[in-house]
Amino acid sequence: PEMASAMLEWIANPGERKRVLVQRAAQQTKLLVKKDTDSDGDTPCQQHAATLSNLTGQDLAKEVRQMLLQPKKQTPIASMDSSSHNSNIAATHKNNTSTVTPVPGGKPSGFGGIEAAAKSSRSREKAAAQQVFVDDGTTESGTVTTSVSKSLRKLRFHALIDSGMGRLGFKTDYPLPNDSRRDTVVILQELMEAEINGGPIEFFGMCTHMAEANATSDYTNSQIVRFKTLLKRVRDAGIMIPTVSTDNSAALLTTTLTHFDPNEILAQAHANTRGYVRTGGAIYGQRPAFTQLRPISTLKAAVRHVAILKEGESVGYDRAYIAPYDVRIATLTIGFADGYPRELGNATGKVVIRNKLFAVAGNVCMDMMMVELGPSSEPTDVVVGDVAIMWGDPGGLVKLSDLAATLKTTQSALTCGLDKTRVLREYI
């Protein structure tokens, strides 16, 4: 509801919207201008030295418009392999707008995704049929056109419904007489009126989130009843709902749940709603309650240093580890700043190196951690540069689910805790 109010205020203030759009256009265009060259590839195009820091108001607007109105070279469309479905599409460009025309005899396109489905909204068709003010940059006042400009960027939104999660969202029931909140349907009607009248927003659908989706709970059914009640009220108010989403990973995979009836949730007049699910941790197999899933994430580090500690010597902060005998210690290139939990120090956590399991020695440091490789009198094949696996080794010696259970947390909490800049992500 707070976001809805903010959007309506934003729509009602075209000056502020225009200022933000002009600033963004300036930043994007300056990046393009720096890379652009003339047709010979030798002489750079005119450079615009002005920046957002030394331009304001009319000067900034004029410079941006000048950049945007510069003639653009037509780039020929590269031919695609005949096996591609997209090879049946031809594009034509005119007056900075583009239309996509199917080639005669081409194959019909399939489901184009949630965005394509949402465009079937009757509200959007109504907006396109009306006269909408579009600032095309050619005059100070803009122009009036009978269709929505292809270049008019819109803010797409879903209405999040609080059917029982209690965190965020529109309420499903009517407000009480002394309640300060407004009815959800009334707010959605205002947003749809703003969209129909040319406001830069697009209603993409409604969603809710299940708080307790498991086989032994009746709460999911009670949530869906509240959600369906609001769906009916919204549709009865004449609002088309392009998409609906209710299920997270748990709700999707719990086979005994019968809460989602497409005949009730998706059916509506003129164009049925598209339904979809929001799989999160299940994509990575991080839902131990469902045995049909297999965890796929692996956390790795490198062996940076191997040394021998004499009996009685210590390693790490607070001298938490003191060598009980002459022992070989490996230092790894990962620490709690990277997201490896400090609580796994002092032999609570284990790592795998060369298919062997080793315990964490001492406290986990910010950028490093140590593991005990065994008595120095025994040979070892661990050397600097070896890969150490924190969890997810092929042999199953260190499982993410076991670490989560040890720390009394969730697998998602561990993977989300990995630093986004320090830990390199590789998708296979």
Image (tube, rainbow, N blue to C red):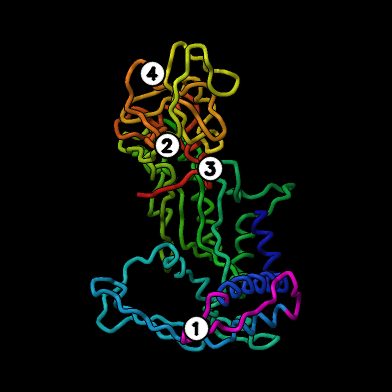
Which quadrant of the rendered structure holds the N terminus? bottom right
- Name the secondary structure under disc 3: loop
* Residue 374 forms part of the magenta stretch: no
Earlier along the polypeptide chain: callout 4 or callout 1?
1
Would residue 392 appear left or right of 211 to someone viewing this image?
left
Earlier along the polypeptide chain: callout 2 or callout 3?
2
Q: CA distance from mark 2 to mark 3?
A: 17 Å
Residue, disc 2: 302
Residue, disc 4: 374
Q: CA distance from mark 4 to mark 2?
A: 18 Å
Instruction: Please name the amino acid that badge 3 sits on.
Output: Asp
* Residue 44 forms part of the magenta stretch: yes
- Name the secondary structure under disc 1: loop
Q: Quadrant of residue 319?
A: top right
- Name the secondary structure under disc 4: strand
Residue, disc 3: 419
User: Would you say the residues marked 4 and 3 are in contact, meaning their CB atoms lie under 8 Å apart?
Assistant: no
The correct choice, above or below, for 227 with respect to 320 in the image is below
Instruction: Please name the amino acid that badge 4 sits on.
Output: Gly
Q: Main secondary structure of the magenta part?
A: loop
